[in-house]
């Protein structure tokens, strides 16, 4: 049976606790809305309201309405997460700026270009998170419909079964999934802020991939085959996902604790720049004897 390797935060990347707390609050709002819909067929306020009059009992359970129907779509999600990501960007950039000769007080997330990048990141983050939750809910609906159609459960039991499945989805979301998402997305925000600061500095030529002590075989392969890339160039392309498929900096996968080190212009001539890796896979020399789950693309 595969096991997870022990996580080691070698470079003291932020754990994303503020983001985790906001995710838990968001998942609780989502849970209440979905359970209210299961019970009543209503996607409006979770308090009060009369069940829908339908031709058949629980007709609404045959089609997942999507988050927009609940008023909890990507824009609402991004509105909740953007201020937290802004704070992460701001802190990371101010910490990184002196390393490349910039005054940290001159860096600000109020710059329209920077703010637009943060908002796009929040929307991508929302799309991925909501899509994952939707797929889990649709799977719970499918299983319940199959049981009801096959006569395994009656109507009342089907709602009870579905409620239990929905609760399990959000129990996981509010615990391990919230932690995973928060750590991964905070690390992404930190490195994105560093990239923008590096671009503003005019003295950074590229990045060197630094492996964490718990680096997975895929990260080891990337670091070995593409140890240094020019600023703006990706280390790897791992999928066709428009948001996470092109890896210009860590995380390469959920819970990735790797980071990058800037390579200054004065060192550029002595640096061997690597081309972008396309669909890399862990190679034998980068594997170890510890059983583990295969790394996955950085979806949430």
Image (tube, helix red, strand yellow):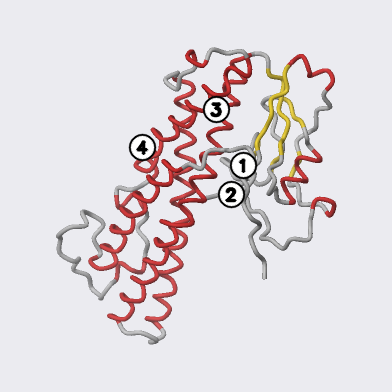
- SS class, disc 2: loop
Of callouts 1 and 4, the N-terminal one:
4
| Residue 81, picture quadrant | top left
Q: Distance of mark 3 from mark 4, alpha carbons?
A: 19 Å
Q: Distance of mark 3 from mark 2, alpha carbons?
A: 19 Å
> Camera-side residue: 162 or 253?
253
Residue position marked by numbered label 4 in the rendering: 79
- Labels 1 and 2 touching (C-beta < 8 A): yes
Residue position marked by numbered label 2 in the rendering: 254
Q: Position of residue 281 (x, y in %)?
A: 76, 51
Q: Position of residue 55 (x, y in %)?
A: 23, 73
> Camera-side residue: 159 or 8?
8
Q: Distance of mark 1 from mark 2, alpha carbons?
A: 7 Å
| Residue 292, picture quadrant | bottom right
Query: Which residue is located at x 34 percent, y 42 percent?
Result: 76
| Residue 257, picture quadrant | top right
Of callouts 2 and 4, the N-terminal one:
4
Of callouts 3 and 2, the N-terminal one:
3
- SS class, disc 4: helix
Query: How would you rate the neighbour count of disc 1 (Cα within 10 Å): few for under 14, some for 14-19, many for 20 or more?
Result: many
> Can you name the residue that lies furthest to the bottom here?
151
Q: Distance of mark 1 from mark 4, alpha carbons?
A: 23 Å
How many badges with numbers are in the image? 4
Residue 251, disc: 1
- SS class, disc 1: loop
- Labels 1 and 4 touching (C-beta < 8 A): no
Residue position marked by numbered label 3 in the rendering: 193
């Amino acid at each position: 049976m595969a096991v997870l390797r022990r996580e080691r935060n070698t470079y003291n990347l932020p754990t994303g606790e503020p983001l985790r707390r906001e995710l838990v609050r968001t998942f609780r709002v989502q849970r209440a809305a979905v359970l209210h819909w299961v019970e009543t067929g209503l996607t409006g306020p979770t308090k009060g309201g009369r069940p829908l009059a339908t031709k058949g009992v629980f007709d609404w359970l045959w089609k997942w309405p999507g988050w927009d129907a609940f008023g909890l779509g990507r824009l609402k999600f991004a509105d909740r997460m953007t201020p937290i990501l802004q704070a992460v960007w701001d802190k990371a950039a101010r910490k990184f700026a002196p390393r490349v000769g910039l005054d940290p007080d001159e860096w600000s997330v109020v710059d329209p270009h920077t703010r637009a990048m943060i908002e796009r990141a929040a929307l991508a983050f929302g799309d991925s998170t909501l899509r994952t939750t939707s797929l889990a809910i649709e799977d719970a609906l499918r299983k319940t419909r199959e049981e009801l159609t096959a006569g395994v459960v009656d109507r009342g039991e089907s709602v009870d079964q579905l409620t239990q499945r929905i609760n399990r989805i959000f129990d996981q979301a509010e615990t391990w999934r919230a932690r995973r998402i928060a750590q991964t997305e905070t690390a992404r925000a930190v490195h994105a802020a560093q990239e923008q600061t590096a671009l503003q500095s005019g003295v950074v030529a590229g990045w060197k991939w630094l492996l964490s002590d718990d680096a997975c075989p895929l990260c080891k392969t990337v670091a070995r085959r593409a140890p240094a890339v020019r600023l703006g160039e990706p280390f790897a392309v791992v999928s066709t996902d428009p948001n996470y498929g092109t890896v210009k900096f860590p995380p390469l996968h959920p819970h990735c604790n790797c980071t990058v080190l800037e390579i200054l212009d004065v060192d550029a001539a002595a640096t061997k720049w690597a081309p972008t890796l396309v669909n890399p896979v862990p190679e034998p020399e980068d594997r170890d004897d510890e059983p583990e789950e295969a790394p996955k693309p950085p979806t949430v």
